[in-house]
Image (spheres, rainbow, N blue to C red):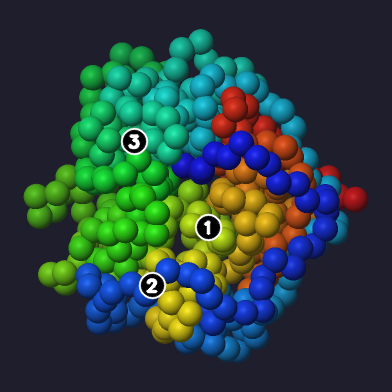
Amino acid sequence: MPRRYTSRFRLPAIVAVALLAAAGCASGAGTPAAPTDSGAPTGGPASGSAAPPSSSDRSTAPASPSGSPDPSGSPSAAPTRSFDPARVSVTLEPYLEIPGAPLAVTAPADGSGRLFVTERGGRVWVVRDRQLADQPFLDVASRVTAGGEQGLLGFALHPRFPDDPRFFIYYTDTERDQVVAERRLDPSDPERADPDYERELLRMDDFAGNHNGGGLAFDRDGLLYIATGDGGGAGDPQATGQRLDTHLGKLLRIGVDGQSDGRPYTIPESNPFIGRDDARPEILHLGLRNPWRFSFDRETGDLWIGDVGQGQWEEIDVARGGAAGLNYGWSVVEGNHCFRDDGCSTEGLMPPVTEYSHDFGCSVTGGVVYRGSEWPGLRGAYLFADYCSGTLWAIDARSDVVEAPVVVAETGRSISSFGEDEAGELYVTDLDGALLRVVAPER
């Protein structure tokens, strides 16, 4: 989860910030020594993956769409802007207090109007009609190591929930490993989870308490995506970001409606590293440090990722619908900048769509593309935040150039996640114990 700092940063509200430095990877003076090639992926993903950008494409200056790679692996060609930040006034409206430290919110597509709010200590709460249930829907506190960047970090309902009674969780267990598990509704009480049933899908041995990722979400094809951090420490000490023999530092993709090859899940045929002896077949994308919150654009299927930086840069990455085998560059680069070596090669790496420096925050919280109907002026905006500063930013989700993010609100909140209700309206969790609603009337 995001790092917590005692100090806070503040920016003037509603200003465009040109946070993207003109110098790209050549500006990495003072960074640590270059990494070795040991364990780095070789040969690239299976055929059919997108062609990555060249070194010149990693410039943080806006780039022409004509110079971008094929749309299957990079920002798609969409020159028409769909969002103008000057048209809206964005605020966070208090919605409900949540016990503990809430860090995720999601909703089933069942017409119930319910929200499921996950809190770090190991509980999931149901909110209906702005009321909190008397008892938690799920309580796995006895299984969870919670605190800092550990805890119950992810929760996803099966796409056919509750007709399919299963849901999925990602947590740090009492051995401090990362676990992805299947749970289900209690057959005797459809308002509660079965306290006795759990089927482990994945277990990832961990070596440090930080950089655990933890996001879970289903795509429109019903496949489960899993975001993992690089295992922690500082500076990617085990080079997991670029290794294909580990689940750490990746975006994984599995099928949960079957089993194969002795696994309690299936491997989608379009996963890019199937058949390679040196690679885990669950890997979809690599080169991530600590992906803290990802989401799918419900209109386009594009995958948006907030990746927490090391000491200088926070970034937002995107995989346009259908992309596979993208390498976001950690720990060769941090954002658009060489991390270890001034002259690093960025061939084969996918640049972020936006970034900001630690002059403006310290820990990005990935957000959501707004596709609801209540706030027309916000449609097409990708909203995200910084956990430390409470700044809320937006970029046009359709833009095909590297954009400087626009500040749309200074919230003073410890924003830990974004989520959508069934209608596509947006909510935010504050780790200090609040669920908030995004309000964005036109000016």
Q: Which residue is mark 2?
A: 33
Q: Nearer the viewer, residue 434 or 262?
A: 434
In the drawing, does residue 341 fall left or right of residue 429?
left
Q: Does residue 388 show up?
A: yes
Tell me the residue at 39%/59% (across/down).
235
Using a 10 Å C-alpha cutoff, classify the residue at mark 3 as few (fewer than 14 neighbours), some (14 to 19) or many (20 or more). many
Q: Earlier in the sequence, mark 3 or mark 1?
A: 3
Taking 420 as reference, is 340 above or below it?
below
Q: Which residue is mark 1?
A: 311
Q: Earlier in the sequence, mark 1 or mark 2?
A: 2
The alpha-carbon separation of the residues under discs 2 and 3 comes to 34 Å
* Residue type beneath disc 2: Ala
Tell me the residue at 33%/72% (across/down).
35
Q: Which residue is mark 3?
A: 171
Q: Position of residue 292 (x, y in %)?
A: 48, 49
Q: Position of residue 98 (x, y in %)?
A: 57, 22
* Residue type beneath disc 1: Gly
- Helix, strand or loop under label 1: loop
Closer to the camera: disc 1 or disc 2?
2
